[in-house]
Image: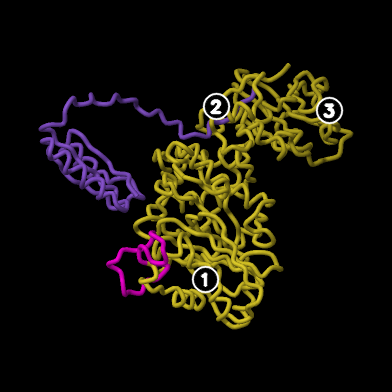
Chain colours: A yellow, B purple
């Protein structure tokens, strides 16, 4: 007989066992002598009752087998686990039980708490607490095609977000599934931890990635980050995530070889999860609210860790007031290479950086777009050995990027684009104060750094935002 | 049968019909909303001239920045004061 949800436990003795457990085998004659109702987890034919689906075990919260329970008026009144003659005699009020058995033997773990089964059991039998609408896919539907058809993907296949997988994802955080993380534009939807988990599953995240995704979403949905406009703009940008702190290494993020590229699960899926939340929860889709003329491939995912070891700079987030585990969100518009294989002094290298940063957006447009300068280890070594920290490098770059407005005027250099005539004779900084971020990342070899251009910057547009990653 | 959880915001937006289009703008109040894009004023200044010549009452409005949605108060102000609104998405 199998357990059904409407079944009531009979008064008397109920036991849960598994045949693989030596202690259960040991107590078999005692259970038969007692006439207990015995449910077996792994062999439907051993006793009269079959709990190979583990529903009874799950509902009774069985953690150890054998478990012996006394039931009175349909309610459990006593329970013992493993074999102990004294405890069993006490529970059953029967004396001289199992005279030829040892005094006691510990039990074994119940299959219903097996880490590989618990999520499926919770999804199936638990009041899982999941509030998302459940979508049934027909047997003849290909699950991947069904999810594409519903418009839930970014163009690549996703991991189907089954309740079991979502429950497992939620184990990555201590936050309640129904807690609201952020109000997500453009539809201004209150997004719960659960909805983030659903999209993180789809993106391919592991549970340990979830806290970083949650922090990234919180940062992205702040007023100063201006995610609505970032999404809606015809410009290239999308949210880029830089991760700092021990969490990066703990969850296997890449800050080294090919840090901005493919091949690392945490980097790839955390950035993707954020974008899937924007798409699915916020309703921001390309061609609808997202009006990007060209976009950039980083809008699929753009997430990496800062290489803190060997860096000439303090961690980016710490420098921005959030020490430890943190994310920094930036409105990134793609990667522009910086090649300098000959400079060996910080002064020369800073001039190379300045020359490349000057063209950010357009060489004649100052104060328009922020940028992140990603300094590689071989370039970083030049600054480290010279004792230049981040503030020194930024200050030098700002001095080098004070531009003569006469060269930037509309029409100057035969280029119509530029600043209005009214600014003639002035000096204009390329970047607003705080608009140039410096990060250390990349593989050991290569005298290359990178500029990641931003979007409309500051109070008019988007400001970088740093937030702590919480468990 | 496989079950997946809906990843969307599960919003049911209320469908609302557009107001009837006016047959003529003469004598009506038309709001011109500048979203603060460069040179949006070029378009709107010319529109204001043309509308005024047609006997339209023109009111001008401006968003603080094009990168953010219009503040609620501004939207209410326009809805209270105007019968028609024209938004400039210039660059």
Residue identified by numbered label 3: A28
x and y, in percent, of residue A362 in the image: 45, 61
Q: Is residue A417 magenta?
A: yes
x and y, in percent, of residue B50 in the image: 17, 40
Q: Which chain is mark 3 on? A: A
Give the number of the disc on residue A355. 1
Q: Residue at x 42, y 31 (%)?
A: B11
**Looking at this rendering, what residue extends furthest in the right direction?**
A100
Magenta part, dominant SS: loop
Magenta stretch bounds: A409-432
Q: Specify which label sits upstream in the sequence, 3 or 1.
A: 3
Secondary element type, mark 3? helix
Quadrant into which the N terminus of chain A falls:
top right
B38 vs A372, nearest the viewer: B38
Q: Which chain is mark 2 on? A: A
A194 vs A64, nearest the viewer: A194
Q: CA distance from mark 2 to mark 3?
A: 42 Å
Give the number of the disc on residue A134. 2
Q: Residue at x 20, y 34 (%)?
A: B84
């Amino acid at each position: 007989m199998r357990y059904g949800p409407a079944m009531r436990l009979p008064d008397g003795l109920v036991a849960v066992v598994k045949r693989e457990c030596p202690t259960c085998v040991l107590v078999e004659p005692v259970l038969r002598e007692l006439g207990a109702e015995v449910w077996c987890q792994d062999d439907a034919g051993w006793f009269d009752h079959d709990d190979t689906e583990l529903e009874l075990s799950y509902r009774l919260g069985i953690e150890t087998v054998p478990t012996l329970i006394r039931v009175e008026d349909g309610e459990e009144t006593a329970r013992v686990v493993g074999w102990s003659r004294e405890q069993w005699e006490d529970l059953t009020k029967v004396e001289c039980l199992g005279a030829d058995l040892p005094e006691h033997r510990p039990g074994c773990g119940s299959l219903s708490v097996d880490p590989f089964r618990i999520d499926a059991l919770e999804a199936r039998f638990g009041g899982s607490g999941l509030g998302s609408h459940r979508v049934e896919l027909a047997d003849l539907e290909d699950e991947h095609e069904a999810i594409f058809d519903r418009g839930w993907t970014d163009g690549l296949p996703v991991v189907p977000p089954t309740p079991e997988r979502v429950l497992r994802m939620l184990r990555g955080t201590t936050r309640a599934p129904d807690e609201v993380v952020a109000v997500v534009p453009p539809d201004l939807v209150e997004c719960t931890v659960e909805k983030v988990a659903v999209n993180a599953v789809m993106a391919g995240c592991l549970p340990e990635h979830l806290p970083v995704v949650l922090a990234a979403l919180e940062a992205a949905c702040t007023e100063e980050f201006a995610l609505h406009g970032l999404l809606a703009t015809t410009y290239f940008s999308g949210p880029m995530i830089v991760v700092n702190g021990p969490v990066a290494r703990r969850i296997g993020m890449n800050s080294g070889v090919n840090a901005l590229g493919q091949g690392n699960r945490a980097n790839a899926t955390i950035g993707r999860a954020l974008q899937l939340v924007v798409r699915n929860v916020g309703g921001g889709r390309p061609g609808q609210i997202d009006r990007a003329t060209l976009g950039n491939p980083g809008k699929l995912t753009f997430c990496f860790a800062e290489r803190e070891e060997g860096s000439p700079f303090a961690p980016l987030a710490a420098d921005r007031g959030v020490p430890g585990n943190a994310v920094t969100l930036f409105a990134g518009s793609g990667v522009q290479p910086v090649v300098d294989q000959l400079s060996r002094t910080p002064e020369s290298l800073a001039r190379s950086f300045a020359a490349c940063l000057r063209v950010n957006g357009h060489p004649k447009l100052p104060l328009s777009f922020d940028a992140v300068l990603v300094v590689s280890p071989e370039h970083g070594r030049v600054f480290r050995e010279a004792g230049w920290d981040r503030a020194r490098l930024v200050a030098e770059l700002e001095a080098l990027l004070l531009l003569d407005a006469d060269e930037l005027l509309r029409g100057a250099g035969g280029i119509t684009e530029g600043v209005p005539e009214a600014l003639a004779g002035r000096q204009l900084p390329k970047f607003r104060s705080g608009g140039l971020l410096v990060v250390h990342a990349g593989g050991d070899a290569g005298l290359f750094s990178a500029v990641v251009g931003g979007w409309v910057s500051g109070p008019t547009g988007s400001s970088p935002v740093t937030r702590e990653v919480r468990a | 049968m496989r079950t997946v959880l809906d990843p969307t915001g599960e919003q049911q937006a209320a469908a609302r019909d557009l107001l009837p289009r006016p047959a003529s703008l003469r004598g009506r109040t038309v709001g011109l909303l500048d979203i603060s894009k460069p040179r949006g004023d070029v378009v709107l200044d010319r529109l204001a001239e043309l509308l005024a010549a047609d006997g339209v009452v023109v009111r001008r409005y401006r968003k603080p920045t094009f990168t953010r949605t219009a503040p609620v108060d501004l939207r209410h102000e326009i809805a209270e004061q105007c019968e028609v609104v024209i938004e400039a998405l210039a660059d």
